[in-house]
Image (cartoon, rainbow, N blue to C red):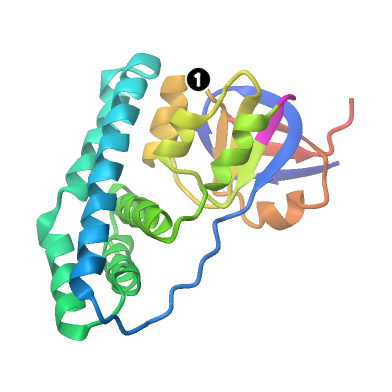
Amino acid sequence: MKKLRGVGGAQGKAAGTILVLNELKYEVKAEKTDDAEYEISRFETVRKEYKEELKQLYREAEVSAGEEPANIFLAYIEMVNDDAFFQKIIKRVQNEKRNLVYILEEEKTAAAALFKSMDDPYMRERGTDIENVCNALIRKMEGLNSPMDQVEKLKEDVVIVAADLTPEDMIRMDTTYVKGFVTERGGNTSHTVILAKALGIPAVVGVKNILDEAGSKTNIYMDGGEGTIILDPDQ
C-alpha cells in the first residue's frame, strides 16, 4: 500500500483496477515535399473534419455536462478556425517545401511554450489547449489512433492513470466503467477538470511520477476532494 498526493481536481471517491493510458508516441521528421499544395489541401480537409467532430462533441457535452462546460468545445473550434495561426504554417510549407506535419509540430511547440511561460495559471493551461488541438490534427494527418480507443472496450470498473487527458477524452469516457482518473500533469483550472466536475467524475491531477508508480500496481483508491490516491489499498 502506497499513498501519493496531487491536486484535488474534482470531488468524489473511487476505487478500481488501474488502466494506464500511455501517451501517443509519434516522431515527426523534417522531409522535403514535392507537392506542397497537396499537403495543404489534405490538411485543410482534416481541419474541416476535425471542426465537425468538435461540433458534435459540443452537442454531446451540452447534454451531459451543461451549456457552460460545453463551451470549451466552442473555444476549441475557434482555435481550429484561427486562420492567422494556420496560414503561417501554410506559408512556411509553400516557401520551405517541407512536410506540413513537421512545421505544425514546430509552431505548436512555440505557441504552447509562450503561454506556459506566463505567470497566470489559467493562461498557462491555454498552452495545453493549443497542444491538444494541434496534436489532434497531427494524429489525424498521420492516421494514428487515440489512446482512448481502448476505453471503449471496458468490462470492469477502472480508474484511468495517464500523463494527461483532453476535454475530448472526457466526453468519450463511459462512466459505467470509468470511476475516476489520475494524471501526472494538469491543474484545477484545466478544461479537463472543469468537465470532470460537470460530469461528476472524481479526479486527482498533478501527481508526480504516477505512471512509473502505477505501472506495476493493480488496484487504486482515490479521493478527488483531498487530492490523494492509494496504490494497492488494503481492505
Which secondary structure lies at badge 1?
Answer: loop
Residue pictured at 82% horizontal, 46% vertical: 217
**Is residue 231 within the magenta segment?**
no
Magenta span? 155-159
Query: In the rendering, at what x and y percent does residue 178 appear?
Result: 62, 27
The answer to whether one can see residue 223 in this image is no
* Relative to 61, 13 lies left or right: right
* Relative to 81, 52 lies left or right: right
Q: Nearer the viewer, residue 125 or 74?
A: 74
Task: Provide the major secondary structure of the magenta segment.
Answer: loop
Q: Is residue 120 above or below residue 68?
A: below
Residue pictured at 68% horizontal, 46% vertical: 20
Quarter-wise, where is residue 110 in the image?
bottom left
**Residue for badge 1:** 200
Residue pictured at 52% horizontal, 47% vertical: 146
In the displayed orientation, state which residue is furthest to the right.
Answer: 235
Query: In the rendering, at what x and y percent does residue 203 appear?
Result: 55, 33
Q: Nearer the viewer, residue 137 or 126?
A: 137
In the displayed orientation, state which residue is furthest to the top.
Answer: 63
